[in-house]
Every structure is written in C-alpha cells, then in structure tokens.
Amino acid sequence: MGSIITRAKRLRALRYTIQAVSLIGLNLGFLNVFFPNLVLTGLRCMGGPVFYCDNCPWSTIFCPLGLLVRYSKIGLVPFITIGTLGLVGTLGGRFVCGWLCPFGFLQDLLYKIRARKFRLPSQLGYAKYVVLVVFVLLVPHLWPHQPYSFCDGCPSGTLEGLIPRAIALHWHVTPGEFNGFNVKFYVRMAILLGTLMLSISVSRGFCRTLCPLGAIFGLFNKFSLFRYGLTYHKCTDCGACAKVCPVDIDPIRQMNDAECIKCYECTTTRHIKMGVG
Amino acid sequence: MKQVMRLTLVVALAAVSVGMIAHSVRSVRYQVGDFQLTELEVNQYTFAEQITHDAKGNLTFTSALVNDEPKTFVQVACVDPALAVSVLQSTALTATAKKPAATKPSVKKLGSKKPAAKAPAVKTPTAKTPTAKAPASKTPAPKKPTPKKPAVGKACPT
C-alpha cells in the first residue's frame, strides 16, 4: 500500500505540473507585458479544446463553450469548434479535464483544504448534460438577448474574465466586458463562490455535475483512443483504485465511464493499466 | 471483433472531425451584412469587442484587447467614417432582418439573431483607449445601435 501511495503522489505531482504548464500556455497574452510587439491575435480566433474563458485579458484561445453559446445565439454551426472537440474527444475522451483544464486544477487544489468531505450521488452527473442542452444550446438560441446562457453564469468566466476585467478597468488598463458592479456581477460572484465552496468539500464537484465541456468529452470516453484496460490477473478486488479516484467512481466496474477524467491515478494500483487502442 | 469495431468508430469520428474543420476552412462562408466571413473571421470580428475607424473610413475590428494588434477588416476608403459605420450597421441589420434569403450556393447566411446588432463603439483608433467600450462580446445588444458622431469624421471630398 505504501508503494501505491508513493506512485500516486508522483503521478499527481506530474499531473499538477502539466496542469500548471497548461495554465501558462492558455495565458500567453501575458507575454505582451514584456514584449509589446508580439502579436498573438491569430490564436485568439481559434476555439481551443480547454475550458478557459476568452474574456480573460491574457487568454490565448477562445473558450469552446463560449463559441458554442455565441454561435447558438446567431443560429450558426461552428464547424471548427465542433471538429476540434470531436477530434480531441475521440483521441483522449475526458483526458483534457484531468490534465489540461485550469479550472479543474483549481478544484484539485481547493479539495486539498482540510474540511468535511462529501460524496455526490451519481445521478447528479446527468445534470451537466441538461446544462449543455439547455444553457449552452437552447436558451442562447431562443433568447439570444437575455442573460440566461451558460456564459452569463459561468464561474470560470467570472474568475478568469470578469474579475480581471473589473480590476483592469479600475486601473484604466483596458476596456471590455465589465458593466460595473451591478446585480449580474454579484450573481456571478455568488455562483463562483458557491462553486469554489463546493470544490472544497466535493472533489471536482463542478466537473462532475455542471461542466458542459465535461459532458461533451464524456460522450467519447467509452471508445476514445487513449483508454484504460484491466490487468485482471492482478485484481484482488481490494478497492484501492476506487479510493484514489478523484471523481468517486469504481474504476474496475465503471471503467472508461463518462465521469472518468482520465487522471490515471487508479493506474498506480497496478490493477489497471492505461493504453492506446 | 469488438476492438476492431471500436477502432473503426474512432477512425471514422476522427475523420469526420478533421473533415468538418477542413470543410469550414475551405468553403464555409457566413454572410454578415454585405460581407462574407470565414468562421475564424466570424470568431474574430463578429464577436469583436469594439470597432474603430479613421478619417478615411477604414474600419478596424478589435477582438483582443490587451496589447493585441487590432486588425483592419473592411476598408471603405473615401467615405465619411460615420457614414461607413452606419452603412455597415444598417446593411447588417437589413440583411438579417429583411433579406434573410440572400444566398450564394456555398454561402451560409446569418440567422435572424446576429451579434452585429451589438453596438460597435465608433471612435478614433487610438491604441489602448479605455473609455469607449462596446457591450460584452458574449451578450449582444438587443437593439439597433445608434452610431455616434466620430471625433474626427469628415466627409469624403469626392
């Protein structure tokens, strides 16, 4: 058991490092602080596969959910965004959630805070599909001018876009999306705080219950190229892999489940292997 | 057998995804007002946070705000800047509201709810001016924008 913990710690350290590198990569706009002539505009028109708000002043890419909401509003189909999500999902499923998503990284860190921990009912996992269909696709299309889309309440957008812009506007650095400390601002702040509080007590609470991008990638988990396999001869049904799973699934019985974020922590038990094909 | 089926599905989905991207880059054009834009241009310009112009009527759509270089999108030379902006706005609104069937074979038209309706801030293209700001890129303004009088606008001599 001791070696399992050691391996799990190593893997977790590697994952956190990659998540931190991903965070920097998604914020390459900060280079303009040091190199004002560096043009990163070309990247900003691309929708990336990662849940990161493009309203962040330093953001390198467009948030795919933001693009889906915007195209839904104007009644068009974003082929490149859908193609990108399809390609990434086909290759890795929810690999992005476990290894690249900065908001997931934040939740991982928040869960380390000593507090009472809870397990969520697995049925709540279906809520993210409702959020995807209703608040990303339907509501923006039916009521494009009403502030009821996913982006209008997105906690990641509040953290990465709204708050930096409020600060920037206060310092007269840049214009942008900030309309003052109105009701919407406080509602979004409340949603953000609620999400962060949830993340302290529930591991990856937002990813498991509300994240529409997790819902999209989860659909690919069952057949994606990078996937888990069992080393049956070693499985003693000890439950060690379930204990280390950050999304509270049983990796043996729910292998490659839509909830699995492919963090590969269960592979440290050596009963489960990761592989290609 | 199951493995083969799964790999076939993976390859097919990957091919469809790549095909969608290639199709969009090569042939999909969205009609925005009088302009046909690629998907990347729609991302960059239609969701722009502000539109500026100079005295010659060059319109500059800016979508990235901090120190990113604004890109000149439409050059309407020799036109009064205010007129250029209002024409752009009115054609965009007309195209979406009254002429939804303006088509070319490979052209996708813009839906009836388009974000060009979000009032572009009309102002001189001074870099990093924090004052005049357009509405949020994610929340297009619901009503028809009223173009402001530009500070340096003057009519074309011709």
Image: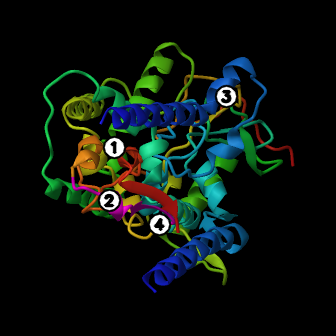
x and y percentages locating residue B102 in the rendered image? 60, 77
Name the subunit of mark 4. Answer: A
Taking depth in this image into account, of A263 and B61 the one nearest to the observer is: A263
Give the amino acid type for the residue marked by disc 4 in the picture.
Answer: Ser
- Circle 1 SS class: helix
Which stretch did the figure color magenta? A225-237
Give the amino acid type for the residue marked by disc 1 in the picture.
Answer: Asp
Alpha-carbon distance for marks 1 and 4? 31 Å
Q: Is residue A16 left or right of residue A48?
A: left
Query: Total marks drawn?
Result: 4
Name the subunit of mark 1. Answer: A
- Circle 4 SS class: loop
At horizontal 55% and vertical 49% (from top left) the residue drawn is B47
Identify the residue under disc 2.
Answer: A132
At horizontal 35% and vertical 28% (from top left) the residue drawn is A109
Alpha-carbon distance for marks 3 and 1? 33 Å
